Image: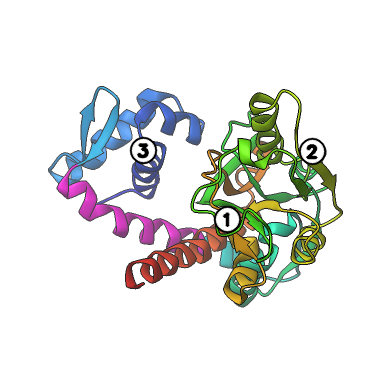
Amino acid sequence: MYELRQLHTFIAVVDAGGFTNAAKLLDLAQPTVTGRIRALENTAGTLLFRRLPGGVELTAAGTGLLPYARRIVALANEAMASMTLNGDGTSRVNIGTVASVTKHRLIPILEYANLRFPNMLVSMSSSDSVDTLAAVRQGTLDCAFFVDAVDAHEDLHTTVLCEEPLVLVGNPAHPLVGRPRVTTEDLGGVTLLRAERNASYQKQFEQTFSLAYSTVRPRVHDLDSVDTAKQSVIEGLGITLLPEVAVADELAAGVLRRISWACPLRVATQFGFSRDRSSDAMLNALLLASRQVIGEQVAQQQHRRLAS
């Protein structure tokens, strides 16, 4: 009989790409992780991983087990959260988020959680990534959804929910729109409109210019919101870099257009809360809902790409 903690550890090894990273992710000693996987393999009667110099690789048996393991762990977590949250009384969760993913990522998550956990009450506030995480550390927020480069946060439990491609956009009449290829040097002298100014991807974006230019650099305007930045671009005041999901509607409508600049930056939508609250049923329920909803969104996006 499989143990739930063994399946949870198995998933962690897959997601982390190895035993050492899984141990860090689960806050366990590596021998404990290794022992659980060996016990699971003994129960299954076959190897689940091939041990490689650079990490691990799933065997055919491991590949077959993975989707079932995810479903079993998800159902167990949901059952526990349901028992905890659907008893007498209500539980309030204070959520920090960033505007670039609120509409397309967070609202569907809240809809999903609202249906399954009716006693969960939500209070949501939006801010820049750094400010949001600082509020989680200070305890004024319970958790946060944020978009940034994937990095370790020793005092926070963070989970990558999905990668978020970044796109540089202008209005249809902008001189850079329509060029088959735009280099970083081509951006010299343009006006950049910046939202989420404390997010590290914005700082890295601007660093590319400090390396590329000695004299002529872009003008950078800080705006108070993602919506303001998008509307300003539509009005022809400049160009902006945002997660693609934040400008999906405007790109589909044709009021914004992609600029063919190969963005070297990699960011992801992530969910984080204090490590001190790792066993909090409410936060784990919200994490479960987030994984489920965003997993379905990503699968649908991949299906549409393959179909187009």
Q: Is residue 277 magenta?
A: no
> Where residue 207 sits: x, y (%)?
68, 30
Residue carrying label 1: 287
Q: Is residue 269 left or right of residue 71?
A: right
Q: In what element is the residue under mark 1?
A: helix
Which quarter of the picture shows residue 22?
A: top left
Point 59% across, 31% down: residue? 152
Question: What is the C-alpha distance between the residues marked 1 and 2?
Answer: 19 Å
Element type at marker 2?
helix
Residue 78 seen in the current view? yes
Residue 137 vs 164, above or below: the answer is above
Residue under label 2: 134
Mark 1 closeness class: few <14, some 14–19, many ≥20 residues within 10 Å? many
Q: Is residue 79 visible?
A: no
Q: Earlier in the sequence, mark 1 or mark 2?
A: 2
Q: Neighbour class for label 3 at 10 Å: few (<14), some, many (≥20)?
A: many
Three-letter residue code for mark 1: Leu
Q: Is residue 150 left or right of residue 295?
A: right
Q: Residues within 10 Å of mark 2 (few under 14, many from 20)?
A: few
**In the rendering, at what x and y percent does residue 272 appear?**
64, 45
Residue for badge 3:
13
Q: Which residues are magenta?
A: 59-79
Query: Residue at image x 78%, y 50%?
Result: 193
The C terminus is located in which quarter? bottom left
Rendered residue at 70%/71% (across/down): 119
